[in-house]
Image (cartoon, grey):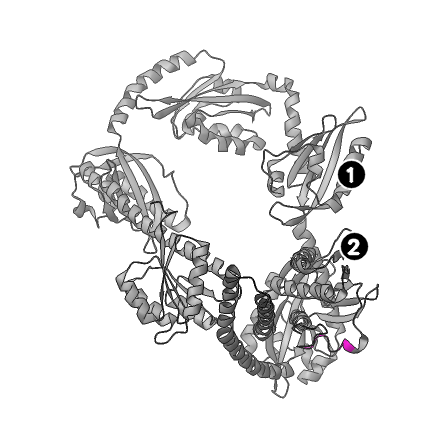
Amino acid sequence: MSEQTASIRILHVDDEPGFADLVATYLQREDDRFEIELASNASDGLDRLDDAEFDCIVSDHDMPGQNGIEFLETVRDDHPDLPFILFTGKGSEEVASEAISAGVTDYLQKGSGTHQYTVLANRIRNVVEKWHTEQEAERIRTRLEAITENSNDAILTIDAGSTIRFVNRAAEELFGYEQDTLVGEPLTTLIPPRHRDTHREAIEQYLETGERTIDWKAVEFHGQHRDGHEIPLSVSFNEFEEDDEIRFVGVLRDISDRVRMEEDLRERERRFRQMAENLQEIVWMTDPEKEELIYVNDAYEEIWGRSAETLYEDPRAFIDAVHPEDRDRIEDALEAQATGAYEEEYRIIRPDGEIRWVNDRTVPIENDAGEVYRIVGITSDVTERKEREQEHDRLLDLLDHTERIADVGGWEIDPETEDVFWSDHLFEMLGWDADEEPPLDGALDVYLEEDRARVENAVQEAIAAGDAFDVQARFRRRDGDVRRFRIRGEPTLDDGDVVTLRGAVQDITEQKRREQELRDEEQFVQSIYNALPDPLYAFDTDGSPIRWNVRLEEVTGYTSDETREMHVTDFVPADEVEEVARKFQQVLEDETPVTFESAIRTKKGERIPYEFTGGPLKDADGELIGVTGIGRDIQERKERERELQERNERLNEFASIVSHDLQTPLNVVEGRIELAREECDSEHLDQADTALDRMTRILEDVLWLAREGRDIGSTEPVALQSAVESAWNLVSECANDAELRYADDEGGLPTIQADTDRLSQLLENLLGNAVEHGGDNVTITVGELDDGFYVEDDGPGVPAEKREKLFEVGYSTNEGGTGFGMSIVKRVADAHGWDIRVTDSSEGGARFEISGVEFN
């Protein structure tokens, strides 16, 4: 039976039989390969594990006797690799950390709804497939060892000190040493004395710099047999790691027969030279590695204008005469000569300054063993032909033109046929396959609809009037990412008619983001020096004060004259000096703001906790001249933080109890209702389902407020319009002909700095509130403020006397509401540092304004 149809045996250990039965029912619906055995505790589970083989264990955490982690540790004693998933209603970082330390394969917290069983089924399939894959890898390793021992080529490994660590049986036959006697010996045992120093130097250089002195594939050199005679070898070797140390593996092949054949071929080369003496083209012959010039005729001196002796001394000396603009290309192409794929045209500069074009083509010569042992080339002077081939300059001109206009993606339009050409990199920028090059109308369709007309008009005007253009537009890649492009174009005219329109597309998304950051930074610095109640300061690059406000003197107690003679570290306690100096240097090196907590040391020796924000200070020319910043007194905040810590601990305890004691019964009820519907249809089930939904929503809102409503994670740039659209997709399923609009007909909402998940909760609650209270056919409008955004509707609005209570926990004007929605909105806004207020909309409905938002 194949892996796709083989059964997957699962041992599910859970002390709640009703829930365990429910899990088994849903898992088998998800995958008919699942065969599930149930155990009510860890002891029962261990007995089942002794009697049968399983592909995966799924276990609860809180159980009588051993808990889930203790059960896991016992299982690992005899089954160190068996997949083990901790599926528990008690979720915390501590439990997760202990589970990981004990060797858990995966960790999943029980939630509400039947979707959790789909997630659990996917996790089971993933861990079992990975386990089976690892077992197969071990079988492959075993087979590889068998292949190594039976190889006809000698295989050996050495460590970084060139000590032999392994040899196979073929090495014994090749060098005359027994396998055991070679292990532990230096590699130089197998190398003739004249080559040993070169080997040591190459190994030392590679370990020190990572640079290879030679190619590591099919290297030819001589080895030394135990009886002293030399053996011509072809060696390929590579690097790997073993036990966190560098190792090298080499495959050695005896090429004695091939060397003898090469000697026979030298006579053929002599006859080749006689043939080439009277040709006008340059005829030359080298070894494949270009280390030795075997022959070059007199035409080289005629065309290159240089002595052939220089070429015999250095077979690559001809490169010195290659035009600088062609040199890199030719050097890169030389590697292809040994495969027969080499033919290049390039310019050379003769000693008298004359530039000539040559055509250089090669033929690899193989010996009787089918190995390339010589490269024969013919080089012709094609200067006159190149001068006649001006039409080929169009391709070069396109490349030069594109590089001059922009440094990213190039394009070209033929106005007569409307054919479009895109460069390879432009395809990559757009996320298109290279075989999808569209006609002109399709090429313009790549831009967002609201920006498309701007680009189309620019292109058509350029074709009609012969004018260059420079526009910006947004493009949505196929992966959903919206990028902002700068599109520039310039026409090529022939007798006043546009015959070609060429241009470039530059991705300026990051540039726009940086410009916004710089504007924000400028406003931030300005606001610092206007915030007079807090200590303001500026220090030069040596740490000496150059500007400060009166508040700094009031807090520290130092006079103006005393402050002027101090250093930045003189304002902080001795135990903070090192950290403050490091932060100061960080601003100077990175030229980016930093925020950190420290303390001010007053003249009297008092210690006052402060939060400092510092940034680079630059002059009018943009030169860095120091660091400027502000300090904020956080004594009261520190007290509040201690109080909040105690309250948060109580809230976490409450959330744990609610999650563990209520979530599992609710899951059982929800599952039983769904199973009952399959057996009968009763209005009592609908009422029970409605009550269960409300209980679930209340539980989820209470848990969110208790666990997640206080803080947010790291923020990132979020496209506000995309977030609104995602939230509306969820809310609109319950809307009665409600409509979502934007104040700007083209959308155009900004990108903001936010926690993605929390922003989604805020938008879902605001849009849901408008649908719930706005009535049928309500119209909801989202728009941009100077420092934020708003959501408003044309419903009945919120009376002024009720607006203060609107954000209180448990307050709801709708029968059946949880009373948590607007409280969650307020918590999310506060956690971001935003302000939220409710007022009347332009249509008389409710308008929620969120301000203090950071734009990107």
Q: Quadrant of residue 409?
A: top right
Could you tell which of marks 1 and 2 lies nearer the N-terminus?
1
Q: Position of residue 40 (x, y in %)?
A: 36, 70
Above or below residue 636? Residue 378 is: above
Q: Position of residue 228 (x, y in %)?
A: 18, 36
| Residue indicated by mark 1 | 458
Residue 618 appears in the picture as rendered:
no
At x 80%, y 23%, the residue is: 495
At x 31%, y 19%, the residue is: 265
Please state which of residues 240 and 53 is positioned toward the viewer in this rendering.
53
Question: SS at mark 1?
Answer: helix
Q: Main secondary structure of the magenta part?
A: loop
Q: Crowding near pointer 1: few (<14 within 10 Å), some, many (20+)?
A: some
Please state which of residues 760 and 197 is positioned toward the viewer in this rendering.
760
Q: CA distance from mark 1 to mark 2?
A: 23 Å
599 drawn magenta: no
Q: Position of residue 180 (x, y in %)?
A: 17, 47
At x 27%, y 22%, the residue is: 261
Residue type indicated by callout 1? Ala
Q: Position of residue 672 (x, y in %)?
A: 49, 66
Q: Crowding near pointer 2: few (<14 within 10 Å), some, many (20+)?
A: few
Residue type indicated by callout 2? Asp
**Residue range highlighted in magenta:** 802-808
The dot on residue 65 is none
| Residue indicated by mark 2 | 744
Tell me if label 1 and label 2 are in contact, CB under 8 Å: no
* Quadrant, the N terminus: top left
Question: SS at mark 2?
Answer: loop
Above or below residue 520? Residue 608 is: below
